[in-house]
Image (tube, rainbow, N blue to C red):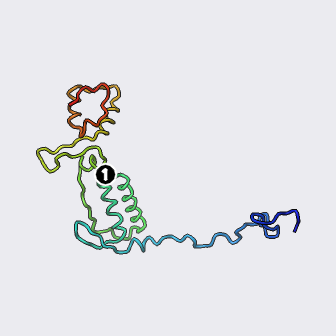
Amino acid sequence: MNAQEPVGYGNPPASKRFKKGCSGNPRGRPRNRHRQIPHDTVLGQMVTIKEDGRKRRVTAAEAFLLPLTQKGLAGDSAAARSSLEAIEKARSSRGEDHEMLEVIILKMVGLGMDSILEPLGIAKKKYPTDEDRVRWELNPWIVEKALDRMGDRKLTVDEQQEVWMATRTPHKVRWPDWWSYKG
């Protein structure tokens, strides 16, 4: 060993250093180190779910897809895309010789504006149990955004009154300078 050559932490002796051109890991990564998850075994297991107050046994795959499908039916396009991709993947992995599932259970959620306006926070239903008085009231933020999108166009006083009456809490809206109706 040379007296000039420092030896210590980060400076091993020359005889122990890696040789140029030789790998520090001569045998490489061990085989089967990253084994695939046994999807078929896990997703094929039977689980008990509770639906509409009743218990029933389904595969784990079906239990996973049910809420995803319900969200898709409710208007969540990402959930709908994911559930359709999962169904297509399952079909292609089974091949053509397997039978299709006989029973498909769909639970319908509200259709129309009810399924969109309230979950997105756009509006709130006022008097939902009274059929004579039920109506939607817009939240202040959506009124402000709509007025911003109008640009230079201004509403008439009658149109302003209609917007004011349809707004849930009109006193919280930052009305534009040209707005004249104040309830």
Q: Amino acid at mark 1?
A: Gly
In the image, 163: left or right of 86?
A: left
Q: Residue reaching furthest right? A: 3
Q: Residue at x 27, y 72 (%)?
A: 56
Classify residue 174 as left or right of residue 129.
right
Residue visible at 28% across and 37% down in the picture: 172
Left or right? Give the position of 71 relative to 12.
left
Image location of residue 121, percent across then percent down: 30, 46
Image coordinates for residue 103, horizontal then vertical, percent: 27, 68
Would you name the residue on which mark 1 appears? 75
Q: How many marks?
A: 1
Task: Report x, y in % for residue 6.
Answer: 82, 63
Q: Residue at x 12, y 47 (%)?
A: 131
Secondary structure, mark 1, is: loop
Outermost residue on the left side: it is 132
**Closest to the observer: 131 or 180?**
180
Q: Is residue 107 above or below residue 170?
A: below
Q: Is residue 75 above or below residue 174?
A: below
Q: Residue 19's quadrant in the figure? A: bottom right
* Residue at 32% from the left image edge and 61% from the top image edge: 67
**Quadrant in which the C terminus appears:** top left
Q: Residues within 10 Å of mark 1 (few under 14, many from 20)?
A: some
Residues 94 and 27: in front is: 27
Q: Quadrant of the N terminus?
A: bottom right
Q: Position of residue 32 (x, y in %)?
A: 57, 73
Q: Quadrant of residue 176?
A: top left
Q: Is residue 76 left or right of residue 16?
A: left
